[in-house]
Amino acid sequence: TQLLEQSPQFLSIQEGENLTVYCNSSSVFSSLQWYRQEPGEGPVLLVTVVTGGEVKKLKRLTFQFGDARKDSSLHITAAQPGDTGLYLCAPASGGSYIPTFGRGTSLIVHP
Amino acid sequence: DAGVIQSPRHEVTEMGQEVTLRCKPISGHDYLFWYRQTMMRGLELLIYFNNNVPIDDSGMPEDRFSAKMPNASFSTLKIQPSEPRDSAVYFCASSRIGLAGEGEQFFGPGTRLTVL
């Protein structure tokens, strides 16, 4: 099982602020996925990163995969209340496909 | 497609009772996953199936938990007997894995289980 550490565990910010959350592991991943879970719902995929050093942008969200493919970050610019949720990372593939999610970062964006 | 369907959405039962959670995956998906989510432990993978066959059940807490997938469109997770510590939100997810092993998991809305 590939253990993923996510930080910070909790984040409470005001609308308009920028933030970065992290997903780290001692293992190398072929690819990594980020999901967002809104209250009362299941997680929804935001992005899959597959190449070391890759940067993907989804509107105000910027995802980066570390060069060594052991870590990833998610940066949100000018956070909005709609960004509130639990951000989870998980490996997307591997020889034995066993998706193990990190504990997640719980983000609250206050208006 | 209606997405992954789970029932019931909420279940309240008393300790010792049998609980059955149901899931209908997205048509054409060949992987099905059962997760449990709590504040203390996060989102834990309990078991997953590939083409209706259980592949890894190492996350199943104990013998009180069992899961079946009799066909490609239906799966159940059963807890017997239930205990208060089983209270959690249980998610079912399905996926179709690509050639490179990547796949997007589509989650159902979850079943919130409360065992009194």
Image (spheres, coloured by chain):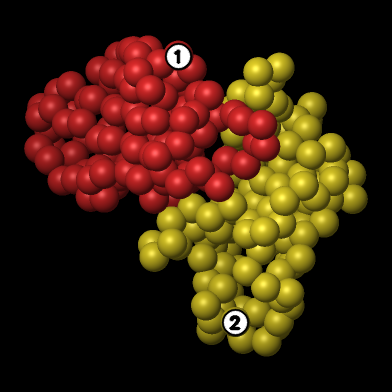
Chain colours: A red, B yellow
Q: Amino acid at mark 1?
A: Thr
Task: Name the subunit of mark 2.
Answer: B
Q: Nearer the viewer, residue A64 or B18?
A: A64
Query: What x and y, as percent, mark residue A82?
Result: 28, 33
Question: Is residue B84 at least partly visible in the picture?
Answer: yes
> Is residue B74 found left or right of A10 in the rendered image?
right
* Mark 1 residue crowding within 10 angstroms, few (<14) / some (14–19) / many (20+): some
Residue at position x 51%, y 34% in the image = A91
Disc 1 secondary structure class = loop
Q: How far is mark 2 from mark 1, CA to CA? A: 44 Å
* Mark 2 residue crowding within 10 angstroms, few (<14) / some (14–19) / many (20+): some
Residue at position x 26%, y 50% in the image = A9
Query: Is residue B7 positioned above or below A64 on the image?
Result: below
Disc 2 secondary structure class = loop
Query: Is residue A70 positioned above or below A1 on the image?
Result: above
> Is residue B85 found left or right of B101 in the rendered image?
left
Query: What x and y, as percent, mark residue A90?
Result: 48, 37
Quarter of the image with the N terminus of chain B in it: top right
User: Which residue, given by chain and number where applicable, does mark 1 sit on?
Assistant: A51
Question: Which corner quadrant of the image does residue B8 belong to?
Answer: bottom right
Q: Amino acid at mark 2?
A: Glu
User: Which residue, given by chain and number where applicable, does mark 2 sit on?
Assistant: B83
Q: Residue furthest right?
A: B70
> Is residue B75 found left or right of B44 in the rendered image?
right
Residue at position x 17%, y 31% in the image = A19
Is there one chain holding both mark 2 and mark 1? no
Question: Is residue B114 at least partly visible in the picture?
Answer: no
